[in-house]
Image (cartoon, rainbow, N blue to C red):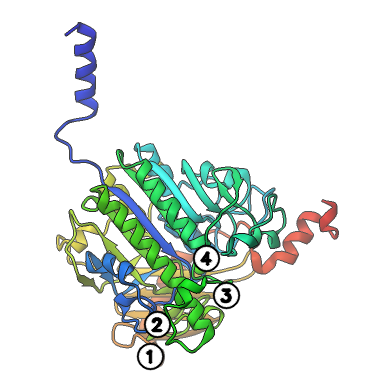
Amino acid sequence: MTKSCISLVAILAFTVPCHAAPRPNVVVILADDLGYADVGFNGCEDIRTPRIDQISDGGVRFTAGYVTHAFCSPSRAGLLTGRYQQRFGHEQNVIFSPDDPDMGLPRDQKTLADALGASGYATGIVGKWHLGAHEELHPLSRGFDFFYGMLSGGHNYFPHLLTIAEPRRHEDGYSSKILKNRERVDETEYLTDGLSREAVGFIERNAEQPFFLYLAYNAPHTPMQVTDEYRSRYPHIENRKRQTYAGMVSAVDDGVGRVLDTLDRLGLTENTLLFFLSDNGGPTKANASENTPLRSGKGHVYEGGLRVPFAFRWDAVLPAGVDYDQPVSSLDIFATSIAAAGAAAPEGQSLDGVDLVPYLTGKREDPPHPVLLWRMKRKGIPAIRSAVRIGDFKLDEDRPREFELYNVAQDIHESNELSESQAERLKEMREVYERWASELVEPKFLGLSQRKQYERERYGSNREAK
Ligand code: CA
């Protein structure tokens, strides 16, 4: 062996120690507007989700798994940064505005893809982004090295409806052609199936190295569109909208099955962190989802808006088939994933989530989150909704300045209001909230609900003349 070869071997031995365990893969599967009650692992009876249930059965079911916001875009901002999104001004649904670099996840925030990518992971997003449409907000500018999906919020599912090659206006979003990295392509399958196909392809291409896959289905968000094949699985559901919804959920379930089968086939199941959750509670009227026994749904700070179906499987480390009842958060996905990967948190970016593994393996018995907090606010307007959970109790402000206190451990439906009998507790919880709120910043962009104001300020009276 020549001297240079010896040096090379020495360098390799130093940088890639042969005794190190292979680093785990991370797969986060996010459903969109899926109700708490609409998966088998939470007791659903009319919709079958056998493949999604395999994640829960093979790992941990979170019975009190929360997201950070009751609707899409802010919830995703919290999940992908591991930080309360109110700390960096992302509190509203973004407007699809491809020429605005400030309409989306603020550019000074790093994502889980940034953190894992810097640590040598291949990083892919398949599905719905919804964190900005400008070039600098595109997933490939935010730490991902593969993207197949859509930048906008909701999206049509049938290929013949995906026609717009150069979407400019917000209303173009649902019908825009799918992006493969930065190129518009023609999807040929029912969109949920197409996303599942691309997720499988990403895993296959990266099987030889650690990877992070963020599979963000837009299903079962509206528009209510499903193929006859999926619908035909539910002849027993009489409500037409619920039947459509059931078929849309089945398409997601089949996709999860394809991901699980691919991991199995490639021998990757054992050492892959696999998260499944919804981005917010079900909007029961819009898509016929159900959040039973939780109160209310999407958009609200009652449990039905914030507590979601949530499961986590990692065969190499976690027990199988167990329930974990302490409150956990979608914020924890970031901290758990970088701890498992041995990756560093982004410099200067403090995390609000925690590594859940010590709690789930029994090393720690204290609650991962003694306090969880929520705020819903629009730019330039006082907070419209807020909530705080401390231990078993939750203080809801679903209407401004109207406070409702519940023991959600005993009263999951939030029907026995305690603010009069426990006024002191209410006051203390409100003080905890106020301290947290004082650390937050004003929302940085006008959201979808302020679209007219946004367009007036940005383009003047004539939108087309811009
Ligand atoms: Ca959603």
Which comes sooner in the sequence, label 1 or label 2?
1
The residue carrying mark 1 has its beta carbon less than 8 Å from ligand 1: no
In this orientation, which residue lies closer to the viewer: 42 or 437? 42
Residue at left offset 33%, top offset 88%: 411
How far across and how far down the image is residue 56, in percent?
A: 27, 68
Please rate how many residues cluster around mark 3, counting C-alpha atoms within 10 Å: few if below 14, some from 14 to 19, many from 20: some
Q: Sequence order check: which comes first, mark 3 or mark 4? A: 4
Query: Which is nearer the N-term, disc 3 or disc 2?
Result: 3
Q: Does label 3 or label 1 sit earlier along the sequence?
A: 3
| Pointer 1 residue | 418
| Disc number placed over residue 187 in the picture, else none | none
Q: Give the residue pinned by disc 3.
A: 384
- Residue found at x 29% / y 82%: 409
Q: Mark 2 packing: few (<14 Cα in 10 Å), some, or many (20+)?
A: many
Asked if residue 205 shows in the view, the reply is yes
Give SS at disc 1.
Answer: loop
CA separation in Å, label 1 and label 2: 9 Å
